[in-house]
Amino acid sequence: MAIFLIVLGIFFRFYHLENKIYWHDETFTSMGISGHTLAELKQEIVNEQVTSFSTLDQYQYINPDRGIDNTVRYLIESDPHHPPFYYVLVRLWAQIFGDSPSEVRILSAIFSLLIIPAFYWLCLELFGSSLVGYVGISLVAVSPLHILFAEEARQYSLWTLICILSSAALLWAIRRETFWSWSVYSLILCLGFYTHLLTALVAIAHGTYVAIKQSFRLTKTALSYLCGTLVASILFLPWLLVLIGNVDTAVTQTSWLSSKFDNPFSLILSFFNRTRAVFFDVNLANDTPWIDFGTVDSPTLYIAATAFSLFLLTYVVYFLFQEISSRKGLLFISLLGFFCTILFLLYDLIFGGVISSVFRYHLPFYVGLQLVFASVITLHIFSDQLWQQRMGILIASSLLIASIISDVSIMRNDSWWLNEPSHTSHEISKAINQFDSPLLIIDDNIINLGAALVLSHQLDSKTHLLSMHEGHSLELPLEYTNIFLLDLSYSQNLFEQARQEGYSLRPIYPLKRLWKISA
């Protein structure tokens, strides 16, 4: 069964990668590959002059005169909160295998495949049981969580892989207690730092586990952990200095995290909605909860799916804390899975932020959740009690069926809720492509610039672009009759400005944020 599910997982990861929309975040991966910076893009197009969409191609594909050093320069100047390991790898990949959206995504799909054996290793180290490992990789192989991140040209499949590998390497190093085992852990941890900044929280979770297991004494194991983490931190120091030196840019690029919410219940609802998506995701979620919490197309299915997820989660937690035999590995799972998540939830509940609503920030928690279910299902299926065997089969069957249904749904759609704010880009391009010599107007808000990069992969060559400085007065070129205004930003300053200046704005239904504009 495990082999069949792995084969199925391979199919879902690589099927029609070219048909998925190349969404906002992915276009900035391609900008990094191109070696250009965000400032260069703005200088090129944000000049209130009409330009061709083909101008954007140089920012989406490899430029022969720009190398890996330019990719790193892009990160330093435009995206310093994203460390360079994934971007250097994807640049090298694109040079060898191609830089089209589907070709770039293959690297993420490969990282996602490597998660399967890495998860098996973690189960062996954590539970000492190959049975838990086989159940675990069966769940991971078809999990919609991993399918979704396998299909996008971002670093999150790699980060998930490194979180799993570093956790398994830590347990292996504790068991072996050799210089080389701790060196492997230190190296993987360092690569994690250079992949995503939140790896620091994973390292803290690891350190807390070591401290508790060593009874807060400075034992050989504790010293080895401290030395390994110190070496990884020193090796990461160069990029940490880059981040400190460009902190204003990092703050600007992550300003959307400063959004506020007023309803704690909505935050909890959003969190459970995303937790359910680890095993069951048929596009019910919304990745902009600070705009519209809980907005779904099928409320009955949404409520039923969330209720079932809460039942499973409640049962699993109850079982873990009731059955003494199931507690092996519980401390490690709790620290790995809940440290980041509880920290983000507490911050949002106290200060009203939205960090806990960002699906990708909870990847360590979702890995921990899959470890819990793998352990509980194995304990049930191989229990001496018949009712537990049946319950284990029911839980495993439910999760696998839900995951496969989700994977089929993902396979049949060209966009997903994770692709906000780009999930309607195909509809936008189809609407604009129907007109002769259309002109699209945007402003220099980062979301709208990203939208232009997304649409550059979809719009006909006859379409032109006019990009305005935010707040500047709007003047429509007289030579164009089919003019559209697109404003996907949360503030919608461009739309409000056009409305206040007296322009006629006709919405293009059923799309949101796209209008046909005229004097």
Image: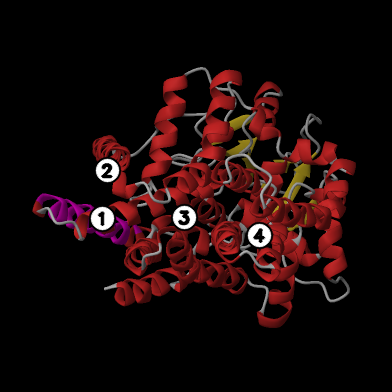
Q: Could you tell which of marks 1 and 3 lies nearer the N-terminus?
A: 1
Q: CA distance from mark 2 to mark 4?
A: 56 Å
Q: Could you tell which of marks 3 and 2 lies nearer the N-terminus?
A: 2
Label 3: few (<14), some (14–19) or many (≥20) C-alpha neighbours in 10 Å? many
Which amino acid is tagged 4?
Answer: Ser
| Left or right of 320 in this view: 83 | right
Asked whether the beta carbons under mark 2 and mark 4 sit within 8 Å of each other, the answer is no
Asked whether the beta carbons under mark 2 and mark 1 sit within 8 Å of each other, the answer is yes
| Left or right of 182 in this view: 293 | left
In front: label 1 or label 3: 1
For the C terminus, the quadrant is top right
Whole-percent x, y for residue 474 in the image: 76, 33
For label 2, the SS is: loop
Please tell me which residue lies in front, 232 or 349.
232
Which amino acid is tagged 1?
Answer: Leu
**Residue at mark 1:** 379
Whole-percent x, y for residue 119 in the image: 46, 64
Q: Could you tell which of marks 2 and 4 lies nearer the N-terminus?
A: 2
Whole-percent x, y for residue 335 in the image: 52, 42
Which amino acid is tagged 3?
Answer: Ser
**Residue at mark 2:** 323
